[in-house]
Amino acid sequence: MRWALIKAAVAGTTMVALAFLIPLGLMVQQTARDRGFTAAERQAAALGPALAITTDQDAIARAVASTDAGAQGRMVVHLPAVGAGVTVDATGGPVPTPGSSRPPAYWGASTGTVAMGPSIGSARALDADVATAASQGRAYTVHVPGGYALLQPVAVDTARVAVVEVYVDDGDLTRGVSTAWLVLSAVALALVAISVLVADRMGARIVASARSLAAAARSLGGGNLAVRVPVAGKQADGSPEELREAAHAFNTMADRVVHLLAAERELAADLSHRLRTPLTVLRLNAASLGEGDAADATRHAVSQLEREVDQIIRSARRAPEDAPAVTVGCDAAEVIRERVGFWSALAEDEGRRWQLAGAEQPAPVPVQRGDLAATVDALLGNVFRHTVVGTAFCVDVLATDSSVIVLVGDAGPGFADPDAALERGQGHGGDGSTGLGLDIVRKLAEATGGDLALGRSAVLGGAEIRLRLQTRPDGSSPARASRRRSRGALFQK
């Protein structure tokens, strides 16, 4: 935008400068030319009184030398011929030639019979041009080598005409023109420079306002809900009205986002709090189950569910900026062993065979322990929810240099439509499924740079969910492992 304004200013100012300066320069050139010929006419007119008094060559020569043009050798006086003249009447006027209606001043122009006498000075004009000037009775300019010759007729008496020749050099006709053009060019350049400076300052203010708005948008997108764009004061001075309106709209949008997020947190907290009543009843019922592994497992599950609900309520009511700093990273193998051990109690009750392989060695991943545990619970919960009682399942952990892969397979019917199962809120079956479990797993994988894939288990023949957690930013996606452990002897009851 800044360069665009500068280019527009340069183009506009250049056009205006040329529109004014070119005619002005031509006028200066014509003025210099007129000034040169006007000065020559004044020099020629200065000899009029001397020629009116006498035609003596010595006297005329002294008169010529007294002028500037004569001193420079640029003035010549062409005297009339001795005895030359025309007949005059009683009033002193010329008598026309018989059969002609034109005065004697025009006779030479048509007949060339006007005779001129000696010349005082070095003449440059041709004799014919001098005779023509004398016969026409007016100033006459002819081109001569190196310049122009001004031929000015001067009446010596009523019957004779002398011609004063003044040489005008070409340099006299262009004196000062080059300087004028340079000055005008400098003025044009100064105008362009000033316009560029003004456009740059205006562009800088506009660009600064636009960059401030863009930076605020990036900051808001990065999670800083407190960022706002100043719409008044020093930082907003000089900003276009449109950008100020955009900044005001941005601030309104940011306020609205904060309000909606706060309302969403309150709604999540209220909805989670409603679970406390059924949880209380469930906890009392679990306490009355008596002794036994199943009863202990049920009470443990209820206690854990109650802790998760409390955590949801606290997290929902906590503002994002007040969230405590957490250390990202955990041992995936340890978390998977723990969660599979938790689900194994229910698997034994339902007669499901299960197997865990590859979780003996540490497998660090860049996710929080609680998030990974919730992900594993979602994957195993799908097995128990969408397969019949007694269906076997397995969990494999494969650690590579750049990622950790978790495979959860079962011996159920598999996915009827894997693409639809990955869509948020769609799920892959009825039975009260919300369809959010796989979406939560997918988001966790993508947050690390990994992915989630659905397929068919090569060993158990049912569904298989492949979760890949990236451990290195520059790691490439490994090919799907085709080698499988022999599970026949590892399945447990």
Image (cartoon, rainbow, N blue to C red):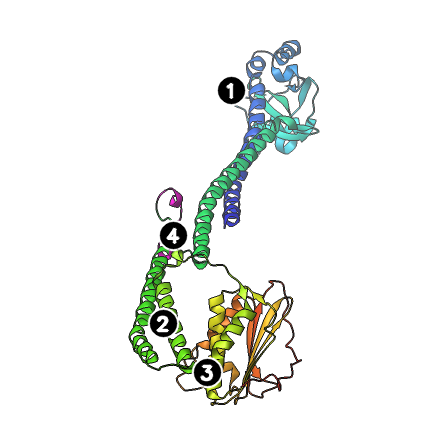
Q: Looking at the image, is mark 3 or mark 1 nearer the viewer? A: 3
Residue 466 coordinates in the image, percent (x, y): 56, 77
Of tags 2 and 4, the one toward the viewer is: 2
Q: Residues within 10 Å of mark 2 (few under 14, many from 20)?
A: some
Disc 3 residue type (three-letter): Leu
Residue pictured at 42% horizontal, 57% vertical: 324
Q: Amino acid at mark 2?
A: Glu
Quickly name the residue at label 2. 306
Q: CA distance from mark 4 to mark 3?
A: 52 Å
Q: Amino acid at mark 1?
A: Gly
Disc number placed over residue 92 in the picture, else none: 1
Residue drawn 38% across and 73% down? 303
Q: Which residues are magenta?
A: 233-250
Which residue occupies the foreground of this view, 235 or 196?
235
Q: Is residue 204 magenta?
A: no
Q: Earlier in the sequence, mark 3 or mark 1?
A: 1
- Where is 24 relative to 87, above or below? below
Mark-to-mark CA distance, 2 and 4: 39 Å
Q: Amino acid at mark 4?
A: Arg
Question: Which image quarter: residue 95?
Answer: top right
Real-space CA distance between mark 1 and mark 4, rounded to the nearest whole angstrom: 102 Å
Visible residue check, residue 438: no
Q: Nearer the viewer, residue 230 or 52?
A: 230
The numbered disc on residue 346 is 3
Q: In the image, is 273 to the left or to the right of 331?
A: left
